[in-house]
Amino acid sequence: DVKVTQSSRYLVKRTGEKVFLECVQDMDHENMFWYRQDPGLGLRLIYFSYDVKMKEKGDIPEGYSVSREKKERFSLILESASTNQTSMYLCASSPGLAGGAGELFFGEGSRLTVL
Amino acid sequence: SQQGEEDPQALSIQEGENATMNCSYKTSINNLQWYRQNSGRGLVHLILIRSNEREKHSGRLRVTLDTSKKSSSLLITASRAADTASYFCATVPGSSYKLIFGSGTRLLVRP
């Protein structure tokens, strides 16, 4: 079974701190994604990566950056955390699929609270 | 931007009844997918239907797609209390790598 592991289930940080959210997948998937989930807003795409060292902005990239140095690992970075970044963060991966995205495999989520 | 919008936002049914959730979207798609999320957990993929397909089945799940109306429905037959979860549709516009999710339907199945 595909496994997507997010390093922390719960984090509490202070405003202005730098925050790293780590995600590792074990199925050699080309594509990896970071979403945030807020009540009533569904999942919104922050960044995605379709290859090592490649990244593309999603719908809400402001305040975030990402790093993909190895195929299995995709990190989300909050350079200076703010209270409006309090949210559930979901990492996902998928195999490359000609003609469009296929099934996503999600991690269990990281619930971040910024005080 | 939200491509898929689910309807209803919340649904409460008795165990054994069928549950129907709808999804509407705005632009042409390559495929449409349905996911399930138990409270506080990650999403789990249920079914993928391609733009040239009209209906797909998986166990107690039946998904239809009407590209002329830009809509899809998810039917769960003979529901169980364990089906209680949030259900999301996600669309893949064109040949994009991106999935765009709706805000979900919260399903409660009463024992």
Image (spheres, rainbow, N blue to C red):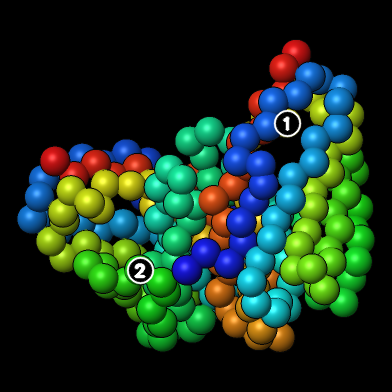
Residue at the location (64% across, 71% down)? B26
Disc 2, SS? loop
Disc 1, SS? helix
- Discs 2 and 1 carry the same chain letter: no
Q: Which residue matches tag 1? A: B83
Residue A65: percent from left, percent from top: 27, 72
Residue at the location (25% across, 58% down)? A20
Q: Residues within 10 Å of mark 2 (few under 14, many from 20)?
A: some
Taking the view exactly as shown, the residue that stands out farthest to the top is B111
Q: Amino acid at mark 1?
A: Asp
Taking the view exactly as shown, the residue that stands out farthest to the front is B69
Marker count (numbered): 2
Q: Chain of mark 1?
A: B
Q: Amino acid at mark 2?
A: Ile
Nearer the observer, B68 or A88: B68
Residue at the location (75% across, 24% down)? B13
Q: Is residue A27 above or below residue A109?
A: below
Residue B9: percent from left, percent from top: 60, 41
Give left or right: position of B72 versus A91: right
User: What quarter of the picture does the C terminus of chain A occupy?
Assistant: top left
Q: Is residue A33 above or below residue A20?
A: below
Residue B90: percent from left, percent from top: 64, 62
Q: Chain of mark 2?
A: A
Q: Which residue matches tag 2? A: A60
Give left or right: position of B51 versus A78: right
Image quadrant in which you'd find residue B91: bottom right
Residue B44: percent from left, percent from top: 64, 49
Q: Residues within 10 Å of mark 1 (few under 14, many from 20)?
A: some
Q: Nearer the viewer, mark 2 or mark 1?
A: 2
Residue at the location (45% across, 51% down)? A41
